[in-house]
Amino acid sequence: MLNINQQTLNDLVKLLSKFVERKPGTLSGSYRSNPQIVHYYYEIIRYWNKINYILKRRLNSTNKHLVSGSSDIAKYLIAIYRIVWEKENTLKIVKELNLTKQQSKLLNNIEFFSWKQALKGKNKIERLSLELAIPSFLINKLLPIIGFRSIKENFEPLKDVEGNETLTFRTNDLWSEKSNQNSIGLILKDLEEHHISVKQDIHFSRLFHTNLKDKKKIILSKSYKEGKLVIQDKASFTVVHLLHPHPNELICDMCAAPGIKTSIIAQLSQNQARIIASDFSTSRLNVMRQISRNLNVLNSHLINSDSIKLPVRFTNFFDKVLLDAPCTGSGTFSTNPELKWRQNEGFLHQNVVLQEKLLKSSIDLLKPSGILVYSTCSLYPEEGELQVLKILKYFKPMELPKWFSPSYKIKNRQIPGTGRLFPAIHQTKGFFIGKFKKK
């Protein structure tokens, strides 16, 4: 049986209260240092619609008086998760959360809650939303495009961290004076000493896969601490690999923070490309500076700027541009569960408008015959196929790897130069990727 100290519970109630009130509630550094807070905050949010569904069923007309604010709701969210998901003793949870005798009545017999019974009479979309812990807005958006079966297959791996059993990492040879092959060998030897078995990726020699349960061992390894090993999803690595950076090229990373993709540009060009890395967020850029130092990224110039109007003197300036644009994150729910419950028409529209402005800016930044790689970790066509249609007249589509899935058909035709990566097919996050040469 798990025990949580009182201070951790108090902090957790505060964070979940912010979430209930729809206030910005991302975990700060102090909270992140407590693994129990991180675990419970993200897991409760991951299953929020399921937990909230149970709570609403309990809060019938006779029980509404038991909730007087967001703090009470937060306590019930914790209690329901602990009892239904972790099978903890109800009396123990009541004591932990200092619930009154009256409040505890809402939890009576909750350990016998049955999803089979609860889902009776629900329509197909409601059932799928609760089964996969995803918003019905997303299902309604994707249903005409990929269908029920594909939605279920692709969001099942993103439902929880435990379901995504593979952990992917890349080797970073920017610290090594030896050959790339020798540096990889030393890293693999270090992991072997920690009893971590790895498998090389079938497409990239620098990418490796291991079991998610070995993540703690990897973080404690010498290679990780020295910046020679970077935990990273395959889709993110693929995006930069498509840019194919060369020494002496001038490259713009338009939305660069926290800097992992910038570090791949540096690595693939062996710190010989000249990189302008821009990001609007000061705090994220500060994190990027630290990451760049840890990974020995050189020849990159960090700018705290809005890339819609990048402060460079000339147009037609860059050899290559990477635009991994801000998006709804609808393909990343396993690592960003908060984004699940922001999925709505307003949030989607906000991101679409921003992406459109950034794409227009990328046209001016690129030299003639310059290369643009555009990507979003989104499964919505509005953030992928429908965006690039707006700029295709300026670009010639480039060939993508054969192992990509085709992008969605728009008006019964595929858009050349575009493709998709899916959790169910590629064991990655859900990504849209396009590669183009400026006319």
Image (cartoon, rainbow, N blue to C red):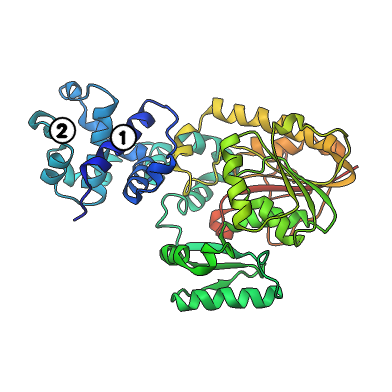
Relative to 190, is 115 on the left or the right?
left
Q: Amino acid at mark 2?
A: Leu
Relative to 3, is 33 on the left or the right?
right
Counting from the top left corner in percent of width and height, residue 340 is at 46, 38
Where does the N terminus fall, quadrant-wise?
Answer: bottom left
Q: Earlier in the sequence, mark 1 or mark 2?
A: 1
Mark 1 and mark 2: span between their CA atoms?
13 Å
Query: What residue is pinned by disc 1?
Result: 52
Label 1 environment density (alpha carbons within 10 Å; few <14, some 14–19, many ≥20)? some
Residue plotted at (45% across, 52% down): 156
Q: Give above or below for 225 relative to 116.
A: below
Query: What residue is pinned by disc 2?
Result: 106
| Element type where label 2 sits in the image | helix
Q: Give above or below for 239 relative to 41.
A: below
Residue 68 is tagged as none
Q: Amino acid at mark 1?
A: Asn
Counting from the top left corner in percent of width and height, residue 181 is at 68, 76
Residue plotted at (44% across, 37% down): 26
Q: Give above or below for 378 relative to 262.
A: above
In the foreground, 132 or 244: 244
